[in-house]
Structures are given as C-alpha cells and as structure tokens.
Amino acid sequence: MDTVVPQVNSLTSTNLVNEPDPARLIHGLRDTGYDFYTAAADIIDNSIAANASNINIKIELTLDGRKFVYFGDDGLGMDEEGLYNAMRYGAEVREDRASLGKFGLGLKTASSSICLKYAIISRQDVSAPLKKLTWDLEHVSEVNNWEMLDERISADEESVFEELCGKSGTLVVWSRCDRLLSKVYADHGGTLESNAIRARRKKLIEHCALIFHKYLNSEEKKYRTIKINVDGAEVEHWNPFYPSKSEQVLKENLTKLTIQLDDGSNHEATVKAWILPHAKDMTKEENSKFAKISNRGQGFYIHREGRVIHHGGYLGLWRSDDPHWSLFRIEFDFDHNLDDAFRVDVKKSRIILDPALEDSLKELLSPAYKEAENRYRRKQAVQISNGISHGDSNKTIAETKNTSKITAEEVDLNKGTAVVTNNKGRGITITTPVENDVEPGKLFVNPVDGIRSGALWEPCLTSATSTDHSTGLHLNKQHDFYTKIYSQTKNNVSIEGLDLLLWAFAAAEHKNTDDKELKIMWEDIRDEVSSNLKKLLRSIDLPTSDK
C-alpha cells in the first residue's frame, strides 16, 4: 500500500505579498469615472486643503496640437518629503479630517484620467528651491515599476509657477493630455480644436461656479473665501438656490437631521427645501443667469464640508425628469464625520442614502415637493373680473420671437388705421385700434371695458413707445365669456391658455386681412363666435363674491 505524503504548501510569508502589476494598475486607475470637470475639481480640493486663497488654472493648446493644463495656487506648498507623500498612490491620511482631500488618491487618479504625464512643482518659502516630481504612465509601463521621474524644472515651468502661484505654493502640470477632448482633430491646433478647448474652458468655469459656490461667495461666512481664475477669467459663484428670490419652505426646527453612526455617535446634517420663483415671475436674464430652471436642475444638491459633491436628481426618492417639479431644489449639507454614513466615493461625486434615511427624507420633504408642483402649475386662485391677471400671457408673447404677426410700417392713431405688410402684400392699409405708450403688462393682451361690436375680442396694434406697433388683443370685460368663464378659472395656466388662443386668432386676422372684403369676413367670424358663446352661457349664472 502506497504511503500518502501530505502536500506541503509552498507559499511562505514572504511570497504571500502579492503586489499589483504597476503597468496594469496605473493605467486601470485612469478609468475611475472622472471627466475633465470632476478631475479639475479634485485638484482644486487639494489647493483649498493647502489653505490657498487664489487658485489659477491655465489651459493651453499649442500650434501642433499638444495640450497642457496648469493648476497653480498660493497655498502652503510642500517640502521634499511632503511632495513625495502627495505623489504616492494612497498618500498618508491628512491630519485635518475636514480637508476636502479624502482618500489620498484624488490628485493621482484625477490627473491620470486626463493625461499620460503629470507633475507637481512646489515650495513652501521663496527662499527654498522649487521641487518637482513626475508620474509618466508610459515610463511606468516601460520599466513595469512604481518609479517616478525626478525631472529638471524648465525655464517655462518656472515662469508658469511665478505667474500662477506667485513666490510659493504648488503647481500641478498635466501634459500629454490625451483625454482632455472627446475626439482627435485632424487639424492639430486648428480652429475646430481651439473651439473645443474654448467650450471646455466655459463649462469648467460653470462647473467651478456651482461646486465651490460656498467658497467663492464672500458673504458665506462659514467657509473661507477663495478666488478661482480660469485663463484670467474670475469664476463668480452660482448659488443654485437663488435665495434672494426663492423661498425656503421647511420650518427651522425641521432643517436639522441627527444621524447615528455604527459606533453610537450622533452627528447632524442640514436639509433645506427651496422653491424657486416661476419663470413667469422672472426676467429671461434672471432665469438664465441665476435660477437656471430645468428638469436636470431639480432635486438634491449635496454638500460635503461646503463643497458640492452631487447635484440634480432625487436619489431615487422621486422621478427626476418631470418639469412639474423643476422649481424644487434641496440643499443637503454634512461634514466629514458622516463620510462613512453616506459612503462618499473617491471622486467625491456621489453618496448613497441609507433606506431608513430615504424614508425620513421622503416624509419630511413630500409637502414641499407637492407645493413646488402647485407653484409650477400656477394653482393660485384668481379674483373675479378686474383681479384676473394676464401678465403671464403678455410675458410669453413678448419672449416668443418666432410667432407670425405683423409689424406696422406707419399708423394713424386718430383714424385707427395702419399700413402693414402681411400675407396679402406690401403697403396694405387696415382699420384697427392703435395704441401708444402701452405698459408692458398690457402690451399684447389687454382687457377693456367694452368693444363697440360686442364681440369677445378684437385685434389691435400696440407699442410700448410710439413706433414698432405690433399685434395686440383687446378682451371685452363685458362679454359673458369673460365674466363667467375667465373669472371662474382658478389657475393662471388656464387663463394664459385662453389668452394665447385668442391672441393667435388676432394675429392670424392681421396677417390675412385688408380693408376690403376680408375685413368684413373677419368681423363676421368674431361676431358669430361671440354671439354663439353668449347663447351657450345664458344658463350659467354670474359668479358672486363668495364663490
């Protein structure tokens, strides 16, 4: 009988160390989910953590198509040991846990996600020499070892350091930027590639304006104020909650959430529910510059230590693609003590809510969520007759530039005539009410105390000055349709819909009329429609003040 010899495990404590393949891993870490904007924000995080007051970014495209990005700050800077640690994948934990830098990976993974070679140049004091270390991913692949480069600092780099950092601080240099743009351009450094760089620059400014809005806003006293410049343009903060015009609808005692960690400790997060003004209550400039109302803009804006790490969407609490809630934005703030509770990722661009917290937030925010829908739908009751507002209609018509309507070439206020160009030809004379110096709220839709023919509506020509008259609409406040239907309409959207329909009829009449047989035809149409509406409404009582 053969003797069975026990198999001896050949592994020893020495070869149980299973180091990752340098070439595979350093290239694999390029695909951790960064884009140019989130990567740049991660570099800015390190500058803020280094107590920088000024952060300057420079994006450079050479004539032969090479692309460089420079990040310079006037922060504390680093000595040789600090620089070595900063360039280590998995750098030592920062002493300040509240630092915007978190895992010791951000600078490296963010940089390599955009470029194949990146360097840090730094010094703490003007009397100290500049120190530089470089990671070159292609060099790591070639030697298959975690080997940095100790390169000479060029005269150009010294010049850029002085330009972007001043006497001391830190300069991050991205070179061989193969992923700065999403495509390769045949004409290297040409017009198309330059335009693409310009678009990247513009979007980076917008991204920084939101992500660091609490640090860029000098009125925000909780966080240190910084300045960020991109190619010489100073980034102005954009507060997504537009507090000067929006309403925070949660009661103060409900804005603090106490969250218990696994170790039994309790920490507070802050939640505020903002409802932005309706687009009809803002100018176009206010909306485009300050409110920026859109489907994608609704939902949570998560801040960690004052820095936005997630924006837009409801994190699974509700749908995020319905415009009826586009006025609703939630400001959610927490500090580093709750990192583990929310499972903050390496890019600091995502959190995960505990199911119990999801339920609590949904219960807390549901009334505000519903109120935001009501305000979007304009479900405010309107008063009878004189209290009916046509402001939304006038604003919509004013801001819609491609409607088919006439502009008068000359008018006669006394005769009530105008010379226009319409579908019947040039120099067509029409008879229509003409008004000058009309206030904006009545420029296109204006209820009047009576129309001579008794019709519900008639077209008119109006101007805010004494020139450039264009199609307007008179509504007869004495007609039963106005007193019985308009007055009973309980939301502004329905009123606006009626106004726009009748204004469109008025514009169609102006575009297709003359002072011959067509004038009579259009008058007959208005008279017949108005008469039929009166007959249909005979059985409906006039509203009373208690309705």
Image (tube, rainbow, N blue to C red):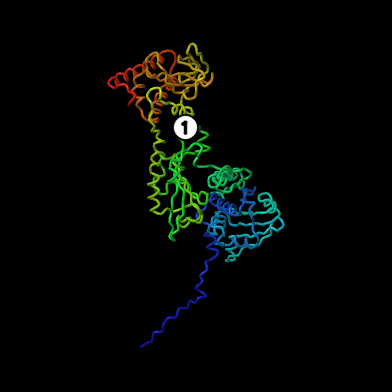
Image quarter hosting the N terminus = bottom left
- Position of 208 relative to 458 (above/below): below
Quadrant for residue 50, please give it: bottom right
Q: Quadrant of residue 77?
A: bottom right
Callout 1 secondary element: helix
Res 68 visible:
no
Disc 1 residue type (three-letter): Asp
Extreme residue toward the right, this view: 127
Residue that protrudes farthest toward the top in the picture:
415
Residue 411 to residue 92: above or below: above
Q: Position of residue 457 (x, y in %)?
A: 39, 19
Q: Position of residue 364 (x, y in %)?
A: 39, 46
* Residue at the disc numbered 1: 281
Rendered location of residue 185, percent (x, y): 57, 48
Number of labels in the image equals 1
In the image, 264 versus 459, the foreground residue is 264
Give 530 or 519, whichever is nearer the viewer: 530
Other-residue count near label 1 (Cα within 10 Å), few / some / many at <14 / 14–19 / ≥20:
some
